[in-house]
Image (spheres, grey):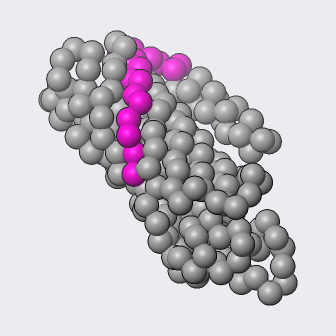
Amino acid sequence: MKLRSFLVAAATFLIASLTTSSLHAQIGLYVNPIASRISNSTADSGTFAFLGQNTTSRVFWGVNFGGYYDAKRTEKVTLGADLRDSILHGNNAGLNNFLVGLRISRPAPERLRPYVEPFVGAGTSRAPETTIHVTKAEYGALAGVDYALGHHVDFRVFEVGYGALTTASSKTIGGSSTSPNIPSATLLNFSSGLVFRIP
């Protein structure tokens, strides 16, 4: 939980620093479905295999919710912050991602609003056969395109993200010396839905 507290403090600092000149600042809120292909180069054959025993890839499904704050605008770029949480399930395992990103987007005279976000955060994973949760640092980047449907609503045409996270495993939970070292898993995320803007 210390990592989460640090990330909330970092997000607060980032937003505060961006709002020093917040002419035409804008907030966007979203709750969207998400699919994540989680894969690992090494299969876990132990009891606490996050993806399932002897499995190297699995798709998790869930919901992605959060909000962004666009604070500083120039003619070519808008800078802001994004704070989000994703709750995913697959193979009776669970994953919760709490992420803070620097949002870089194109100003909004056009209906299409592309954006990119490098992010850091904390991922909490739970393997299928246990109630033990493992929290590790997570990092990556995402990109997407929002399409303005009206003054206050955007359609998120797509959002794709790539990240890395050390998940629960027989090594991190069981600690057996015979368990293989499982490297960080890669997460390939896809999401779409609606964004509600508050001018």
Magenta-drawn segment: 19-35
The N terminus: image quadrant: top right
Q: Residue at x 65, y 81 (%)?
A: 45
Q: Is residue 164 magenta?
A: no
In this picture, residue 168 sits left or right of residue 175: left
Q: Residue at x 44, y 17 (%)?
A: 22
How many marks the image carries: the answer is: 0
In this picture, residue 171 sits left or right of residue 118: right
Residue 51, quarter of picture: bottom right
Q: Nearer the viewer, residue 183 or 28?
A: 183
Q: Nearer the viewer, residue 90 or 119?
A: 90
Q: Residue at x 58, y 70 (%)?
A: 52
Measured from the top left, where is residue 26 in percent x and y?
38, 19
In this picture, residue 5 sits left or right of residue 18: right
Residue 152, quarter of picture: top left
Residue 79, quarter of picture: top left
